[in-house]
Amino acid sequence: MCIGKVEFSVNMTNEETVAAALPMQEHWLPLSNLDLILPPVDVSVFFCYNKPIITIGTHHNNIVECLKNSLAEALVSYYAFAGEIVANSMGEPELLCNNRGVDFVEAFADVELQSLNLYNPDESVEGKLAPKKKHGVLAVQATWMKCGGLVVAFTFDHRIADAYSANMFFVSWAEIAQPKNNKYFIPTTQPCFRRSLLTPRRPPSIHPSLYDMYVPIIDLPPPPELESDIKTDPIISRIYYVTSEELNNMQSLANSNNSSSTKRSKLESFSALLWKMVAAAASTDNENIVAKMGLVVDGRKRLSNGDKNKEEIMSSYFGNVLSIPYGGRLANELVENPLNWVADRVHDFLEEAVTEEHFLGLIDWVEEHRPVPGLARIYCGSTGGEEGPTFVVSSGQRFPESKVDFGWGKPVLGSYHFPWGGDAGYVMPMPSPKRNGDWLLYMHLPKTHLHYMEAQAPHFFRPISWDYLLN
């Protein structure tokens, strides 16, 4: 087990740009209205592999060549990742599909894979194993470890893809890379780029709740100027695991005294627990402190509204189809009430955002404000009441780490990594790579909040370790 700090260096050994294997006609792809409410932030994902099985006559170079060749083939279908973002005449971002390609870095880290402190990705992943995207939409880094292990990491522009879209790409790329598949193998899922699926209505119809949920950036308050206005509690990233037994206990508590026929899901229950703990960690003598939590909702099924044909099309839609409803409650109220009460409040604010009408209204809201960009209000801090902790929970239960097998076995660990730089925290629960019902938790929250949770609930928030992953 490795939890302590391990110093290591990463040396770049090769860098090149990988373009799609087939030529394409240069064209423009507009961003949908649901893309336009995403800020220009990058998201990273990394996968750790034990020493790849190398056949006689096969070397590291062959494995990296396999990655690059299969990437080139994957970019034929996922051409959006090979383009670049350019501002149009209105100042809005558009995607120029010019097959610029993907920057691909090969590197070597002078550390054993099992010496990586994955509990602290700020130390082990950020700036070392996750590539910095300098150009284009996607960057890839393949890092060999001293033991022969391999870490493959990606960084992509969130304005072009949400996690659902990125997951489709990872699986397709891995399918193409499999030795059993011939050149120009067509992956199981072909991405759909039909922006007409997300066009605004004429006339628009916008529910008042959307004006509370989203804000034009011109209406945002100015950034703090005085030193006293700047928060001193740094936001850090940590990775935990939580056992299926603890998850089941948590869900049972969240459903106690629940007279409703609708059972609170594990995600609702976990979000409620997190909301309570963040509120407790932030509790002060100020009784007016408000703790705010947002939950990311995927709109693909909602926009299908039971239509099987549309559901099939939307299931392969590439781009952002997200909304972030949120709730704000007095911190003391969240602390004093039981978990089932908090879970009901989570369900309440989620309920208004899990419909087709909500997403159609959001598309109309963006259209009403264009070309001024909008932003989910939860990311902005000022959502009413005294300033308090703000964070977002995004479910990663569809994270397909077990399917990202490039031909040398499944990863021993895969995780998103999103230290996005804003004041709001970010939490993503994902299935454990052990596939035993446990969860992996990527948590990007203030340092004091994470320390509080570890101290108050060590049985729940367990630091990820190689002992856990390999035993």
Image (spheres, grey):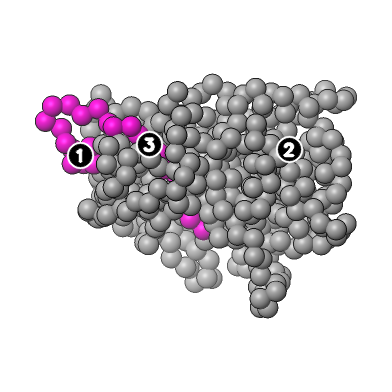
Earlier in the chain: of badge 3 and badge 1, it is 1
Farthest residue to the bottom: give it.
226
- Residue visible at 26% across and 36% down? 148
Earlier in the chain: of badge 3 and badge 2, it is 3
Query: Which residue is labeled 3 in the image?
Result: 114
Element under disc 2: helix
The C terminus, quarter of image: top left
Query: Which residue is labeled 1 in the image?
Result: 60
Query: Which residue is labeled 2 in the image?
Result: 273
Determine the CA span between mark 3 and mark 1: 19 Å
Residue type, label 1: His
The boundaries of the magenta stretch are 41-66
Asked whether 350 or 20 is in front, the reply is 350
Residue type, label 2: Leu
Determine the CA span between mark 1 and mark 2: 45 Å
Q: Measured from the top left, where is residue 388 in percent x and y?
A: 76, 58
Q: Is residue 25 visible?
A: no
Q: Relative to 188, is 158 above or below?
A: below
Q: Measured from the top left, where is residue 347 in percent x and y?
A: 78, 37
Element under disc 1: helix
Q: Is residue 117 visible?
A: yes
40 sits to left or right of 370 = left
Q: Quadrant of residue 457?
A: top right
31 sits to left or right of 83 = right
